[in-house]
Image (spheres, rainbow, N blue to C red):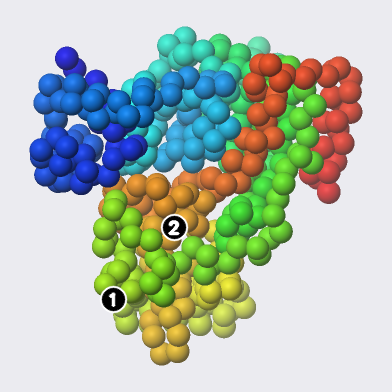
Amino acid sequence: MSNDLVHHYLKEALCYYKHKELAEALEVNVGTVRRWELRETEPRPYLVESLKQLLLPWGEQKSGGDFKFIDLFAGIGGLRMAFESIGGECVFTSEWDTYAQRTYQANYPGNAHPLNGDITQIHEKNIPDHDVLLAGFPCQPFSIAGVSKKNSLGRAHGFSDETQGTLFFDVARIIKEKRPRAFLLENVKNLQSHDKGRTFDVIRRVLTEELGYQLHFRVIDGQHFVPQHRERIVMVGFREPVPFAWDALQLPAKGTQRIKDILHKMDGTEPMLEWDASRFFNHEEGRVNDKYILSDKLWSFLQGYAAKHRAKGNGFGYGLVGPDSVSRTLSARYYKDGSEILVDRGYDLNPRRLTPRECARLMGFPDSFRIPVSDTRAYKQFGNSVVMLAFQEVARIMQPYIVEHELNVVQPDLLVQMSAAESEAVAA
């Protein structure tokens, strides 16, 4: 019996039991269960039967879903969480970073498929059939020569030439082979303006002209859902003409959420999370651990740096937030000095960084989300992730056009009119 099978049942059991409860039932210590979970050590194969017995009160874990999706450039699974919330089943995952893989595996137990690495090394024919493709693809620079020059050289100037060598090419080749019902791609807002708009034009033409999908795109600010200004371009595509419209989005007013809503509570109401223990917050003393407070040296440096740039008339410097603030964008470099989001601790006290748990909340992840990596890795991972709640809302308005029995096809000429109106609205 394989160790993968043992881990499958172990992950299922951890959905229902705390580590301590599971350790007592299996007659081992809590540390052993945690090491099994992280695959630092391997549990004995005979434990499968014991784990099955522990799962009996809940029955077999629900398998399948209303639709199937794949998760490319998965990171820590923010898009996956959003689409599981509307009934989707993830059937393929690809993420090359081993530390992100560790976080992903800790949060998505019971996977019926292995976690794949570098997508560039996986043939599109080996990817399972799916209804929806999700990808937060990194945008590498496109090198685009003029079409007339390519024609004069006898070279292709479409899908096979303009996107080759970029990670978007890997998304496109999978869409071309598997023809999913829909896709969702996301990237930084500036993708639209990169290389004077030529990069986005190539992406648009590949998705629509080369692959034949109906494309809808919009910039969405995470500030509608969390106290963070974070704009991302969201590209939604459908294989068939459907009456999808961004007007269906239900976006709470910006500023509804404030920094105080994601900070650790100092009044005794901070939840005690078993998986965090006292790593970020000292529950006995009701305060954030001292390691997140800036040292005198670093605080002095940041103040001097900001003053120097103010004297030059620009806005470079740190971002200090109070309880009623909305923060700047959390970046992957936050681990360096935390300068873009520093929590004000009051007069004559050095500010502090957000803890990784607070970063998780700032990105819309629930407190059940586990952080098994170091603080440095966690800051990078949350800075590279998506505001999960924003994409949960996008998933919600896509759902009627993904689930087969609800599919409502419209006439192509009507959809062209809708797309034109949508493009004008986005431009405005």
CA gap, disc 2 and disc 1 = 22 Å
From the viewer's side, name the closer residue of 62 and 41: 62
First in sequence, mark 2 or 1: give its number: 1
* Residue 349 higher or lower than 40, as above or below: below
Tag 2 residue: 359
Q: Quadrant of the N terminus?
A: top left
Q: Position of residue 232 (x, y in %)?
A: 62, 46
Along the viewing direction, whichever of 139 and 47 lies nearer the viewer: 47
Residue 112 image offset from top left, x and y in percent: 36, 21
How many neighbours does mark 2 have within 10 angstroms: few (below 14), some (14-19), or many (20 or more)?
A: many
Q: Is residue 3 above or below residue 199?
A: above
Outermost residue on the bottom side: it is 348
Residue 23 vs residue 147, the one in the foreground: 23
For residue 295, side relative to residue 185 (left or right):
left
The secondary element bearing badge 2 is classed as helix
Secondary structure of residue under mark 1: loop
The single residue placed furthest to the front in the displayed view is: 57
Pointers 2 and 1 in contact (C-beta within 8 Å): no
- Going by the numbered disc 2, the residue's amino acid type is Cys
Determine which residue is flagged by label 1: 285
Is residue 62 visible to us here? Answer: yes
Q: Amino acid at mark 1?
A: Glu
Q: Position of residue 262 (x, y in %)?
A: 49, 63
Residue 96: give x, y in percent of width and height: 36, 32
Quadrant assignment, res 285: bottom left
Q: Is residue 65 left or right of residue 150?
A: left
The residue lying at 61 percent from left, 46 percent from top is 390
Against 85, residue 66 (above or below) is above
Q: Residues within 10 Å of mark 1 (few under 14, many from 20)?
A: few
Q: Residue at x 67, y 31 (%)?
A: 398
Residue shown at 65% from the left, 36% from the top: 396
